[in-house]
Image (tube, rainbow, N blue to C red):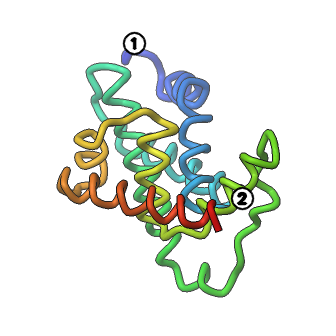
Amino acid sequence: MDTTSQPSERLELLLLTHGNTLYRAAAAILGDVYEAQDAVQDTFLAWLEKQPDCPDGAHERAWLLRVTVNNCKSRLRSPWRRKTGALTESLTTEGPEESALMEAIQTLPAKDRIVLHLHYYEGYQTGEIAQMLGWREGTVRSRLSRARKRLKTLLTD
């Protein structure tokens, strides 16, 4: 990608290219569309402040996703969040099966939601997720396995 353009043009291109991906990840983690929008906005503000030098689009996407995930983790730790409830009805789904799946996913702990989303929705391998989150690869694999089991239990009950 061309890194010689003006920051505002570059930001617009990043928003068009990665905005939906970041929003979906944030919404899956936070379970609230408005907080997800804020987390993505904070990600792009961080990009404007730091303007990281990414040699290709894959590194850029990974940087943006990592910042988005970290923003979401910070929001989940916020004392304000503990006083509010999730707006699961505002998450759009295509059918009743997908709606049930989204509701089940939202009941999982945030760390489980993060790995499920990055693996199944964004297509990252466990090694890439580990690098993104600063975890060990074995931790990602075990968290993914536990999340699958919890999800299976929730969906079969």
| Residue 59 position in % (x across, y down) | 31, 29
Q: What amino acid type should be assigned to the residue bearing mark 1?
A: Asp
Q: Which numbered disc, 1 or 2, marks the residue closer to the eye?
A: 2
In-front residue for pair 11/75:
75
Q: CA distance from mark 1 to mark 2?
A: 31 Å
Q: Which residue is mark 2?
A: 34
Q: Quadrant of the C terminus?
A: bottom right
Q: What amino acid type should be assigned to the residue bearing mark 2?
A: Tyr
Q: Earlier in the sequence, mark 1 or mark 2?
A: 1
**Direction front: furthest residue:** 156
| Residue 52 position in % (x across, y down) | 31, 36
Q: SS of the residue at dot 1?
A: loop
Q: SS of the residue at dot 2?
A: helix
Q: Quadrant of the N terminus?
A: top left
State the residue at coordinates (72%, 46%).
98
Q: Report the number of discs.
A: 2
In-front residue for pair 90/35:
90
Q: Quadrant of residue 147?
A: bottom left
Q: Estimate how packed mark 1 is, as few (under 14), some (14 to 19) or many (20 or more) residues with alpha carbons within 10 Å.
A: few
| Residue 61 position in % (x across, y down) | 41, 32
State the residue at coordinates (50%, 61%).
72
| Residue 65 position in % (x across, y down) | 43, 43
Label 1 close to label 2 by CB (< 8 Å): no
Q: Quadrant of residue 63?
A: top left
State the residue at coordinates (62%, 35%).
20
In-front residue for pair 153/99:
153
Q: Estimate how packed mark 2 is, as few (under 14), some (14 to 19) or many (20 or more) residues with alpha carbons within 10 Å.
A: some
State the residue at coordinates (59%, 60%).
105
Q: Which mark is residue 90?
A: none
In-front residue for pair 28/103:
103
Q: Which residue is mark 1?
A: 2
